[in-house]
Image (cartoon, rainbow, N blue to C red):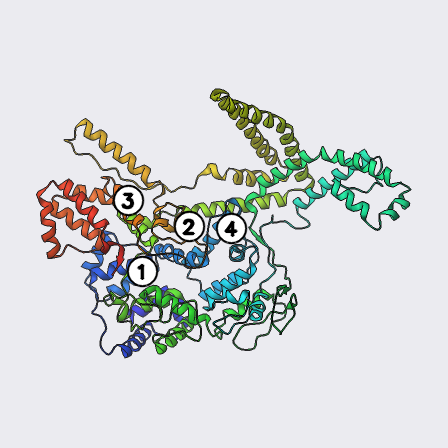
Amino acid sequence: MKLYLILLFLLPSLIFSATHPNDAIAKINSLVNSKLEGNLNKKSDDSTFVRRIYLDIIGRIPSIEESSSFISNKNSNKRQELIKNLIMSEAYVSNNFNYWADILRITNDGGNNIRVMTAAYSQWLKKSLRDNKRYDDMVFELLSSEGSVWDNPAASYYLRDNGMPLDNTANTIRVFLGTRLECAQCHDHPFDDWTQMEFYQAAAFTYGYKGGTFPSDKNSNLSGLKKHIGALNREKFAQAAGSKKVRVVFNEKQLQDLLKNKNFQKYLKKSNMSQEEYVRRARKGMQATTDMKLIQYSTKETIESLFGKMRSTTLDTKEKDLKLPHDYQYDDAKPESLVKPATMFGDKFTMREGESRREAFARWLTSTDNPTFTRVIANRMWKKAFGVAVFSPVDEINDFTNVRNEELMNYLEQLMKDLDYNLKAFQYIIFNTDAYQAKVSATQIGTKEAYDFRGPVLRRMSAEQLWDSLITLSIENPDIYLSSSKSDEALVSSIRAKYQAIENMDTNEFVDKIMNIAEYTASRDKEIKDLRLKTLEARKEKDFQNIKKHQQATKKIYKSIEEKTKNTLAMSTSGSMDMQMMDSMNYKAKGNKNKFQLIKQEPSANLSKNQLKVRNSQFKQFEKMLTHFYRASELSSPSPRGHFLRDFGQSDRLSIQNANKSPTITQALNLMNGHVYRVLNNPHSLLGRKLHASKSTPESFELLYQAFFSRKPTTREWEILGKETKISKSEATKNVLWALLNSKQFTFIQ
């Protein structure tokens, strides 16, 4: 009962549930045992369990202190207590962010255009996990979202697939309903019952959203600027043409199209003008507006510098009817016919008054009555813990789906509903089952193969788990460094401030400032072009001195344009513009880095000057190597090609759950010769300091085994290690460190 009260406090949805966690655990044990006939694997020992539970819940191995504290604890409920503490930790957020970012394909790839969107999306996901937001609420927010990402970051779900609404529908149905509709996008599904019409009916709910433009409307300052430039062009055209009656055209194509227009002759007659006269006047006007093109280009550049990061930050959800494709080949409708939204399965569905199509779709999809929504997430959470799902694949339910334990699956589905989609409470129950806490089965289970869940399956760490575990060996308190989280928050806040400052600015003042900047930029354009030509000439002559001189001069002009922009916009009469704009424009200069709490290993008193110099050099190397040594959730998403994470199979986030755990030659070379070994072996790393402080070679070996495997060496391992005790402690430690780092045992979850 005491444990239940703790859970009620920490996992609130259990308060409103008739489900006692111990009853749920016992029920799952019974359902699993009914298929086992007494063949449950033996219970895992504490060393194995503590390493596994840390990796499964928070995505890294425990530190020596964490594992030792657990193993020495004599409390009979220590496993339940540890599971609860890990689930409620910030590290849980880090691990589960990696899991869901892979499913939702959250990516930084795409440059500044999507950087703000990705930052807001990542913030939203981490906060949702931290707050333990109901899973059905999370999904509803994603599917019903609209507006700007700083007001509604869930809008990033659609912006991620901007320009690909049909692909977004296929991904949505696959991720949340476990149904593969990709084939039905082009034709009736060849191996399932889904038709192309059903796919388009589902897509019609969310079709028509649009992103990728600047977040502005008809009353915005951007619209005011556009009108001003248009009026300026018309004024210059009229002055050059000699009359406001001369119809405005800006290029030869527009002129020729106008001459062919059937109403053009009526216009000439009404204007008392011959065609020859009109053409002559129009070309004079066109020449005058040509002179404005440089100003227009400079204006565009200024706007791009101001609003560039605001692209893909606003979701316009104006509903638009979806049409069948032009090559639709079935008898139930004609090609290019309008399609009305309709649900794929479940009870009869009707839209509510005032409800948008997206809201209706989100309500239907996340309903407890939806036949697959709850089933899919319950199965996903089970696979996340055991390494094998109750049915596989987790995202492809069809007539041929093999459910390994139907009674268990039905209970897990109902349990998820009873817990009000509380993922932390659900996982707490799973991790406390006898089956999860049993020893692993060293068996590879195929998609259609039977498995009775006598224990989790032996599986390789993900790239993120391996990376985060190596960081745990390198620095203290790896979970406190939230570099990406803080920089994402700062970036979104700065862009929000910039947008609000611009929108709050008086339109006339905004137009004056932008035109002022554009005219200044245009005035420097000729200088830039001249310098570029001079640079090209210098390159031909291999005149490196002048190349450098011209490049520096060009850089100086661009710097002056940047200063002009900053200073002009800062001088606002609106009052609020000043600080907001300057803060957002100085975002990069502020810096958002977390400084690692490095502890320099104090040198021994008997070190020579040369040895002391080497030790100081090692510290500087360690500092340099740790520049990007944050947990995977705090790095670029995904990491660039060539990074440790990508070498070890991190998803490229182009498709759903695209990570790969297969071993490669590149991985072996990375562990044998890469910078990770040098970091761990550095005397200033966390592990290096502990090894340096150890009093004997055997003590160093014990430390290494505790660090890597959360246990001491076995008798057989001591026999093997005995050979290393005959050489120096330093060399022996290096050898064993290298061996454990490259062992299969380290990279697997037992």
Q: How far is mark 1 from mark 3, CA to CA?
A: 23 Å
Residue type marked 3: Val
Residue occupied by mark 3: 676
Q: Please rate how many residues cluster around mark 1, counting C-alpha atoms within 10 Å: few if below 14, some from 14 to 19, many from 20.
A: many
**Quadrant of the image for the N terminus?**
bottom left
Residue occupied by mark 1: 56
| Residue 477 is at least partly visible in this image | no
Q: Earlier in the sequence, mark 1 or mark 4?
A: 1
Q: Earlier in the sequence, mark 2 or mark 4?
A: 4
Q: Please rate how many residues cluster around mark 4, counting C-alpha atoms within 10 Å: few if below 14, some from 14 to 19, many from 20.
A: many
Q: How far is mark 2 from mark 1, CA to CA?
A: 21 Å
Q: Earlier in the sequence, mark 2 or mark 1?
A: 1
**Quadrant of the image for the C terminus?**
bottom left
Residue occupied by mark 2: 638
Give above or below for 369 relative to 172: below
Q: Earlier in the sequence, mark 4 or mark 3?
A: 4
Residue 117 got which mark?
A: 4
Instruction: Locate residue 694 relative to residue 2 in the image: left or right.
Output: left
Q: How far is mark 1 from mark 4, CA to CA?
A: 29 Å
Query: In terms of secondary structure, where does tag 2 sit?
Result: loop
